[in-house]
Amino acid sequence: MEHTAEPAIKVGDFNQLKVVRETGIGLYLDDGATGILLPKRFVPDNVRVGDELEVFVYHDSEDRLIATTQRPMGKVGDIVPLKAVSVTPQGAFLDWGLMKDIFVPRSKQLLPMRAGGVYIVKIYIDEQTGRVAATEKIESFLQNETLTVQEKDPVDLIVYRRTDIGYVLIINSQHTGVLHFSDIFRNIQVGDRMQGYIKTIRPENKIDLVLDRQGYDRIGGEAGRILEMLDQQGGFLPYHDKSDPEDIYNVFGMSKKTFKMAIGNLFRQKLITISEQGIRKS
C-alpha cells in the first residue's frame, strides 16, 4: 500500500494544503492529523473538498494552528516595518495585516514601543511557545560576510537609519547597504519599503545602492519615454541638463543622471536639440 507523506506545516509562512472536510464554521485543511481550520470568512468562492489552497498558517488566541487567505506584511524570516497598535507591560502588539496582531516581547524591544509608532522588526518563531513573534533587535540577523546579491541585481529595500553620507538600507532582509544622498531624488524616511538595485560592491563587501537601474542598459527605455513625452507636448519640454534633480524626478520619474544620459543619447542620434530653454525634438 502506498504511503502518502504527511504535509510539513510551516508556521508563520504560506502552505499549499488540501481541503479535507467542510463544516459550518469553515474548511479543514490536511495537516496529517485533525486538520487546520480555515474560518468561513476567509474561504474563497467555489472551493470544494479535494481542492488545494495557498494559506498562511499561524496560532490563534487559543494557541491553535489556524489558516487564513489574508496576506500578512511579512512571514517568518522577513524584516519589515510594522505599526504598533497597543502596548502592555509584557510587550507590544503590531499590525501585520492579519486578524490577530503580532507580539513583540518587552525583552525584544530596543526602547519601550508606543502605540502608533512604526518599528522595523524581524519575524521569527519563539522557541518556547512555537508562536510567531517579532523582535526589534535585528542587527545580529544582518551580515555582509557572505553576499547573496551581485551588482545590478534588483533588490527589496527597507530604509533603516540615516547617516552622515546617506541612509543605511536593509537588503532582502539579509544585508545592509548605503543609499548616498547624491543618489536620492525623492523624499524617503526610515521605515519606507521600496525596490532598488545594487550599484557597486566595494572592498569588504560594502554595498552602494540606487533606486533606479544604472548605466546605459536602461537608456533605451528612458530615451523612448522622453521622446513620447516630447510628442505629447508639441515637441518641446522646458528641462535640460541643468534642471533641478527633484523637478526631473517628478516629471520624468528618473534620476538626473539617467535623464542626462538619455538626452545625451538622443542628442547624439540627432533626435533632439538641447538649449538653455529645454529640449526640442529635431
Image (spheres, rainbow, N blue to C red):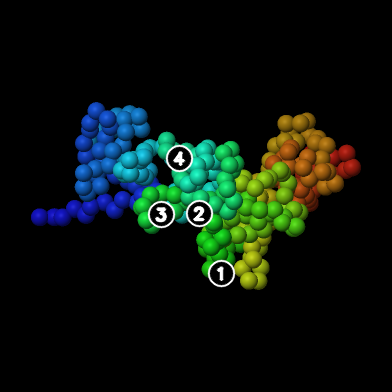
Q: Is 131 on the left or on the right of 36, as rendered?
A: right
Residue at the far left in the pictured view: 1
Q: CA distance from mark 2 to mark 1?
A: 28 Å
Q: State the SS at label 4.
A: loop
Q: List the residue tagged with mark 2.
A: 107
Q: Given contact means CB atoms under 8 Å apart, are the residues at marks 3 and 4 in contact?
A: no
- Foreground mark, 4 or 2? 2
Q: Amino acid at mark 1?
A: Glu
How far apart, in angstroms, are the residues tagged by discs 3 and 4?
15 Å
Looking at the rendered structure, the secondary structure element under dot 3 is loop
Q: Nearer the viewer, mark 1 or mark 3?
A: 3
**Which callout, 4 or 2, points at the residue further toward the start of the chain?**
4
257 or 81: which is nearer to us? 81
Residue plotted at (75% across, 57% down): 164
Q: Mark 1 or mark 3, which has the lower sequence index? A: 3
Residue marked by disc 3? 126
Q: Quadrant of the C terminus?
A: top right
Q: Tag 2 or tag 3, which sits nearer the N-term?
A: 2
| Residue beneath disc 4 | 101
User: Could you tell me residue 41's position as x and y percent?
Assistant: 35, 29
